[in-house]
Image (cartoon, coloured by chain):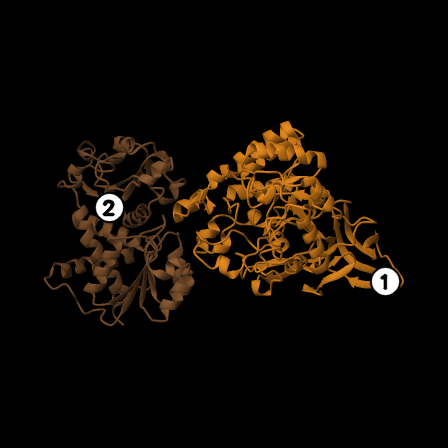
Chain colours: A brown, B orange
Amino acid sequence: MTEAGQLQRKDILGLEELSRQEIELILQTAQSMTEVLQRTIKQVPTLRGRTVLNLFYEPSTRTKGSFDLACKYMSCGTISVSKASSSLVKGESLRDTVRNIEVMGPEAIIMRHPSPGAPHYLARMVSSSVINAGDGAHEHPTQGLLDLLTIQQHKGGFEGLEVAIIGDILHSRVARSDIWGLNKLGARVTVCGPASLLPPVMDQFDCRVTTDVEEAVRGVDVIYVLRVQSERQQQSFFPSLREYHRLYGIDVRRLALADSDALLMHPGPMNRGIEITTDVADGPQSVILQQVPNGVAVRMALLYLLLGGG
Amino acid sequence: MDRILIKDGQVIDPASDRSGIMDVLLEGDTVAAIGESLSVEGAKIIDADGCAVAPGFIDLHVHLREPGQEYKEDIASGTRAAARGGFTSVVAMPNTDPVIDDETGVRFVNDTAQRDGVVVVYPAGAITKGQKGEELAEMAIMAEAGACVFSDDGLPVARASVMQNALQYSSMLGIPLSVHEEIPSLKGEGVVNRGRVSTATGLPGISSAAESAMIARDIELLRLFGGHLHIAHVSTSRSVVLIEQAKSEGLNISCEVTPHHLTLTEDLVRETQFDTCTKVNPPLRTEDDRMALVKALREGTIDAVATDHAPHSVDDKDKEYMFADFGISGLETAFALLHDRLVLTGEVTLERLVESLTIGPADTFNLPGGTLSEGQPADICIFKTDEEWAVNPDRFASRGHNTPLVGWSLTGRVMTVLVGGKVILKDGELTC
């Protein structure tokens, strides 16, 4: 990091590769962006004249909208290419798509892609900054950072904090980014889900693993509920959404096992009545709706730290 | 008749237990004599002082891609890659386009190899028509045309009843089935080993049971229905245990292992930040698996080293990890990699390594060569054990530059290769 507090890196590919200091700088910058978001006129001229390319190989409403807003508030131009648009369905390779767009000179490329490692591949190919907006089940660093920001706002810090992540850990990029980030900041993570949705060799992450949801949430400071995808039931990972809800759904009774000030979080979109019940999702401990504007703030912060200054 | 005298080399011929500084006399296309200080009038001399002289290496498993995928490799380029690696005979896998599943296909590979090839090519025929796993291919007719093994490699024989019939039917012919052991539904979308790396990267994993469970099935079929079961590219410690047990019961089973599974692990996927040249099937496994494979090679449970040379074009590999093709271009680095990583570290002796590249594979598929005794084919590999070189795919003879070893410095280099008494590689460079 320089004196000016810029990130000394070209890309944001995952929380695994960020240091604690870098994460703290991003969170601090994002916190100041939340103040910008409180203003009536939210647009600042910081990145005027800069251009960002949004490249979405998977459908996304929330993340793409959040990046779009972040770009708009920072006054940078955007080009969007998504799966539905022509070149991607015509079978053009990622390499060719990106080379064609890169000659137009975007300063950053934001990419969501179904293959883990695709942003790493892209980052090697281009001189622009690359921000990973989700690569398969690997990482979703901006989600991880907005989750950290939300926790920090409520809990002040992370040292000694107990966090339980509940659900489909195996297929979750959110879980992976959250675990890396929380571990680096000193929180203790427990992951919990049906055994068929827990990845092997979790010891490398330094987190507790259990299939018992009540054990997982007892006394914790944060319950983080993951979205369950119904296609996993068709793929025989679990028998039914009803049974999933019975074993892992977070409701009033299970929330009550956590610390009385515990936060309830979810990356959205929620399946109400399955992984989470409406009364707790909309209840006083839920910070789910605060995660969303924090997402805009985190993305503004990253654009600023990668593209700002110079 | 042309006479060549290879002088003063360190002969390593595990089949005959010969070892020491000796001369090898070749007459025409056969070995005429081996002994100390031979002197022969009028023979052309190859000075092998400071080099090891071994039988030409034999590779039971290469993909030459011809017919149909010549943009990846063809018989001309693939056999030159073989020569660069010290291999004088290769078994060409039949998963080409079209699949080699009939007499015409086998003859095409033979004829093309005669015309364009620089090493001996043994065609493999498919087990099932089109490698679809449904109907048996014409094994007897393909055997007559020169197929030395049958394989649906690239794919398992998924249906147990088809595998049962294939074992029974091939047992009449005395020809092995080389099988790619994998339960399709356990592989699924998998691209790396299921374990530490799939968990950290989110890449879909292929569990070791995808391989070992299929091996267990086929051992049970072999026990009841006969035939010769050859397990291609063994990659897991459990596979080794099952094969070892089957061997101890006297079942007709053999197996091969690749240089990459003996020397690399899944960790390379992360260390290289998703280099698609680490994407190979079966996937690179754990260090425990690797150690079990090395031990099994050392102790003889594994019969042969085979490269599974799988050349691909730049476009097939220069893409996202999930979408890249599986495979490593392995012929030109095999010996050096194994020598550097296993022999120099003391994990395997040089003699055992040479054995697993020569008489081991020859005996496994009942092929000529693999030893330097009189009357044997004049197929020779002369290499240096102290020469260091850096892997540079731009210099490969193979069209497939897909190796995860780019820039690696390896000690051990193939210098001179003769096939049928003809020099095809000299000082590490092709002469043909």
Please name the amino acid that badge 2 sits on.
Pro
The answer to which of B55 and B37 lies nearer the viewer is B55
Say which residue label 2 marks: A269
Location of residue B71 in the rendering, given as x and y in whole percent from the top left corner: 57, 60
Chain holding disc 2 = A
Q: Quadrant of the N terminus of chain A?
A: bottom left
Q: Which mark is residue B43?
A: 1
Chain holding disc 1 = B
Would you identify the image quadrant in which residue B431 lies?
Answer: bottom right
SS of the residue under disc 2: loop
Would you identify the image quadrant in which residue A88 lies?
Answer: bottom left
Q: CA distance from mark 2 to mark 1?
A: 81 Å
Q: Residue furthest top?
A: B224
SS of the residue under disc 1: loop
Q: Can residue A67 be seen?
A: yes
Please name the amino acid that badge 1 sits on.
Ala
Position above or below: A117 against A248: below
Left/right placement of residue B200 relative to residue B8 reads left
Does label 1 lie on the same chain as label 2? Answer: no
Left/right placement of residue B93 relative to residue B431 reads left
Location of residue B419 in the rendering, given as x and y in whole percent from the top left corner: 75, 57
Q: Which mark is residue A59?
A: none
Residue for point 85% across, 62% down: B43
Position above or below: B193 against A236: below
The answer to which of B283 and A148 lies nearer the viewer is B283
**Local crowd at mark 1 within 10 Å, few (<14), some, or many (≥20)?**
some
